[in-house]
Image (spheres, rainbow, N blue to C red):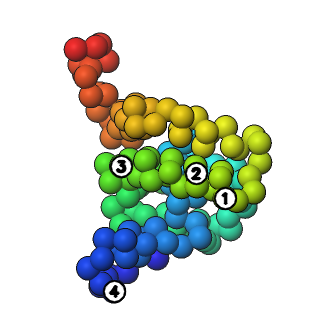
């Protein structure tokens, strides 16, 4: 849920007000790491089984919070959700949350691999993932490349 007036000026509170519900980080994870950018794909392929009304609310709130954009495709076409720069900058946060979950909560072997890879790759891998997301979601070249994708 997006809160208009923050409860305090605390940076942790500011983040929790945007991301602190049960689903927002899971939706961002699926867009970020699974490239699920359409409503039906997000709902159908969610490991956690998000309900359509909850997903619609979370997507709306994440757009309002400036973490996602939603294109306007016109009648009869699927809307595509894209990460904003603020959303992309959550890669290290999700990497660290995944590592914490791996160490302190029951997880499946299949889904542990991503958290382990992100942890083992550290900030260098996070920067590479963020560069790829910028290219895919913001439409620009990766940093260090020319507009045609060649290395500078």
Which mark is on residue 104? 1
From what the image shows, is residue 12 above or below residue 82? Answer: below
Q: Nearer the viewer, residue 85 or 123?
A: 123
The answer to whether 20 appears left or right of 8 in the picture is: right
The mark closer to the camera, 4 or 2, is: 2
Q: Nearer the viewer, residue 108 or 3?
A: 108
Cα separation, mark 3 vs mark 1, equals: 24 Å
Looking at the rendered image, the quarter that the C terminus falls into is top left
Q: Are marks 2 and 1 in contact (CB under 8 Å)?
A: no
Cα separation, mark 2 vs mark 3, equals: 15 Å
The mark closer to the camera, 3 or 1, is: 1
Q: State the residue at coordinates (44%, 32%).
A: 125
Is residue 82 visible in the rendered image? The answer is no
Which mark is on residue 83? none
Badge 4 element: loop
The mark closer to the camera, 1 or 4, is: 1
Q: Residue 58 at x, y = what percent?
A: 52, 68
The residue that label 3 is drawn on is: 89
Q: Residues within 10 Å of mark 1 (few under 14, many from 20)?
A: few
Which comes before the other along the chain, label 2 or label 1? 2
Which comes before the other along the chain, label 1 or label 4? 4
Badge 2 element: helix
Q: State the residue at coordinates (75%, 40%).
A: 110
The answer to whether 145 appears left or right of 89 in the picture is: left
Cα separation, mark 2 vs mark 1, equals: 10 Å
């Amino acid at each position: 849920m997006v809160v208009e007036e923050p409860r305090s000026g605390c940076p942790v509170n500011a983040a929790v007000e945007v991301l602190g519900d049960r689903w927002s980080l899971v939706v961002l994870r699926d867009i970020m790491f699974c490239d699920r950018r359409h409503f039906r794909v997000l709902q159908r392929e969610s490991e956690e089984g998000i309900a359509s009304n909850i997903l619609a609310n979370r997507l709306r709130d994440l757009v309002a919070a400036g973490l996602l954009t939603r294109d306007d495709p016109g009648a009869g076409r699927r809307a595509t959700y894209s990460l904003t720069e603020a959303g992309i900058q959550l890669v290290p946060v999700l990497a660290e949350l995944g590592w914490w979950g791996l160490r302190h909560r029951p997880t499946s072997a299949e889904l542990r691999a991503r958290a382990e890879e992100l942890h083992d790759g550290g900030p260098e891998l996070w920067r590479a993932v963020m560069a790829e997301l910028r290219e895919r979601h913001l439409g620009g070249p990766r940093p260090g490349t020319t507009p045609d994708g060649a290395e500078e």
